[in-house]
Amino acid sequence: MISEKDFFAAVLRLAKPHTPSDREPNTVDREAAIAALEEAQIEQTCDCGTCLTYTLLYPGAPIDQDLPRTYLSVGTQGGDALVLAHLAGVRLTTLEVAPTGNKSVAALPDADHLTP
C-alpha cells in the first residue's frame, strides 16, 4: 500500500488546473511542493464517511494568506473519484478524494490509477 505522502506526490506530478482560471504550476513549483511534503503533518479532517479529506500542516509560521492559491484536480481510471488539491504558494494545504457517484471513497486509489 502506498503512503499518503507518496500518493500526494503522485497527485502533484499529474494534476491539472481544476478550472480555466487556475494557474498551471511549473515543474519547479511542483517539485518544491513535493519536497515540502517531507515536513508536513497530515490530518484526516472529514468524517462525513463519503470522501477522504486531508489537511496538511507545516512547522513554523502559518502559511501566508496572501500567497497565490492554486486548485488542481486529477481523476481516476474508471472515473469513480476526483482528487482535488489546494496549494498555497508551493505548499499543498488540502487534498480531497471525492466520489463521482453514489459510492463512498474508503481508501486512497492506487497512484497508478490516476489520470490527468
Image: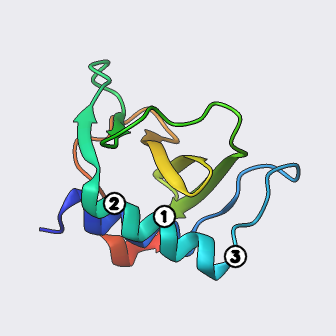
61 with respect to 19 (left or right): left
Q: In which quarter of the image is residue 29?
A: bottom right
**Residue in the foreground of this view, choosing between 112 and 34:** 34
Between the C-alphas of marks 2 and 1, the distance is 7 Å
Residue placed furthest toward the top: 48
Location of residue 10 in the rendering, given as x and y in whole percent from the top left corner: 41, 72
Percent position of residue 45, x then y: 30, 25
| Residue at mark 1 | 33
Relative to 28, residue 50 above or below: above
Question: Which quarter shows the C terminus?
Answer: bottom right
- Seen at 46% across and 52% down, the residue is 80
Tag 3–tag 1 contact (CB < 8 Å): no
Nearer the observer, 71 or 66 = 66
Q: Which mark is residue 96?
A: none
Q: Earlier in the sequence, mark 2 or mark 3?
A: 3
Residue 110, by quadrant, is bottom left
Query: Who's the residue at 32% across and 23% down the image?
Result: 46
Is residue 116 in view? no
Q: In this view, does 22 lie to the left or right of 18?
A: right
Kindly state the secondary structure of the residue where label 3 is placed. Answer: loop
Tag 1's secondary structure? helix
Q: Which disc number belongs to residue 37? A: 2
Q: Residue type at mark 3?
A: Asn
Q: In which quarter of the image is the N terminus?
A: bottom left
Residue with the mark numbered 3: 26
Residue sitting at 63 percent across and 54 percent down?
A: 72
The residue at 39%/62% (across/down) is 36
| Category of crowding for the residue at label 3, using alpha-carbon neighbours closer than 10 angstroms: few (below 14), some (14–19), many (at least 20) | few
Mark 1 residue type = Ala
Residue 42, can we see it?
Answer: yes
